[in-house]
Amino acid sequence: MSKIAQPDTLAGHFALILAALTAGRSHLVGLAQTEQTQGLAACLRALGAEIDCTGHTWQVTGRGIGGLISPAIPLQVSDDATAACLLAGALAPHDVFAVLAGSGHVPPRVLTLAETCGARIEAASPGALPAAMRGARNALPVTCEMPDALGLATALLAGLGARGLSRITGPDVPELVGLLQMLGADVTAEGTTLVLHGQPELHRATISLPHQTRLIIAVDGPAAAGKGTLARRLASHFALPYLDTGLLYRATGRRVLDAGHDPADHGHAAQAATTLTPEDLARGDLRGPEADRAASAVASIPAVRAALLDFQRNFGARHGAVLDGRDIGTHVFPNAPVKLFVTASPEARGQRRHAELLARGAQADLAEVTAEIIARDHADRTRAAAPMQAADDAVTLDTTEMNAEEALAAALAAITGTATSGG
Ligand code: CDP
């Protein structure tokens, strides 16, 4: 029995096939290695794409539109109906001969679509696998109406390889359109119809599929190392929510101070941590030396850390996230597939924090600011509860000599080149 196409499988498969149709090397981040994705990757390799995968990061060197080659072996799709349909759609406008093998079938709407392009599919009975497929030499554009997302994606792949304008009517699936546009395809919506210009030059890209695996990116490191700036930029790059976990400790410390207690007092600090509200996190007085010290003090209390753990895990579990802090890769999300440990020399960090304070109009002395940072690092590193340290599988980025742009570029290179497995 064929599996029903799940939306997640569909977007992941669609992205993998698109990457194989780009000219150059693309990266897919956030696509889990499953039997299905590995099966599809094997088919795309047989069609001439080069594909490597580490953890949730895939490197795909594509063939360009029109560049797929006739495979020397059958394309084994086993019972993956999504792969069977999408491959039929992608091959229909290519001048290739391929055998699709497996236990599923190609549904009638996809057979009709392939014929519209000028392709031929032959099998023992219509749509059965194995099927021999001869793609069209000069594929014609498609005009069709598809009842579901899988049909829509299949028609989009067929239209991509055809000459001229295809017009495909179907459900609204912004993720598929977004992927096409990200790679440079010209696709626009006219009501419920997508108008697609065929045979575009698809360019290489880093394609993020964070919601496939609820991608977690852990960014840890000492004070003022540039974690926040980097984490914010990564979140925007991968369209993921962002959580500055330092704020949780800062807000907890601030509440204890407001109540007139010592932030090192376990009972009062734990009470403040368990009753934090969103308004506490939005306060304007969470930065500055006093808030820094109070945060560091409450952060060494196990009951405070325990109280804040669920919030952080729930935040990441909903849609994936980028989180910055001290213990994200070691305690909060020890299985995060991407872990960065961001550092910089104490002098560079002192200068950055000093400049930040001056920009906010605060009085600050560079030597004092640097000394405070060094003292806080020491406390964070040597405390018993979840001390700050790089996870064994984290990639360390020393940003002493980097500006924010360079740090982002280095982080993206680390993520796409060396992301570790897990998740
Ligand atoms: O912005 P900066 O790097 O100076 O600090 P932050 O990230 O806002 O964190 C403030 C303090 O909260 C740190 O010095 C740590 O003591 C504590 N913290 C922690 O223990 N664990 C985290 N995940 C985040 C912050």
Image (tube, rainbow, N blue to C red):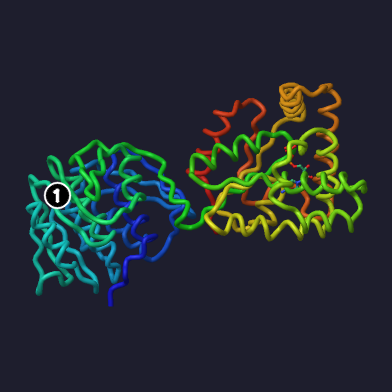
Look at 30% across and 67% down and name the residue there.
80
Q: Quadrant of the N terminus?
A: bottom left
Q: Residue at x 55, y 37 (%)?
A: 233
Name the residue nearer the viewer: 130 or 356: 356
Q: Position of residue 212 (x, y in %)?
A: 45, 57
Which quarter of the figure has residue 222? top right
Relative to 90, is 297 on the left or the right? right
Numbered disc 1: secondary structure: loop
Q: In the picture provided, is 344 more to the left or to the right than 149?
A: right
Cβ of mark 1 under 8 Å from ligand 1: the answer is no
Relative to the observer, which residue lies in front, 283 or 132?
283
Given residues 354 and 50, the one toward you in this image is 354
Percent position of residue 202, x then y: 28, 38
- In the rendered image, the quadrant that contains the C terminus is bottom right
Residue 400 in the image: state x and y as whole percent: 67, 28
Q: Residue at x 24, y 74 (%)?
A: 103
Label 1 neighbourhood size at 10 Å, few (<14), some (14-19), many (20+)? many
Q: Position of residue 272 (x, y in %)?
A: 82, 54
Q: Quadrant of residue 161?
A: top left
Q: Which residue is mark 1?
A: 93
Q: Seen in the image, is 207 located left or right of residue 373?
A: left
Position of 362 relative to 185 (above/below): above
- Across the whole image, how many numbered discs are drawn on residues? 1
Whereabouts is ligand 1, in terms of quadrant? top right
Q: At label 1, which amino acid type do we have?
A: Pro
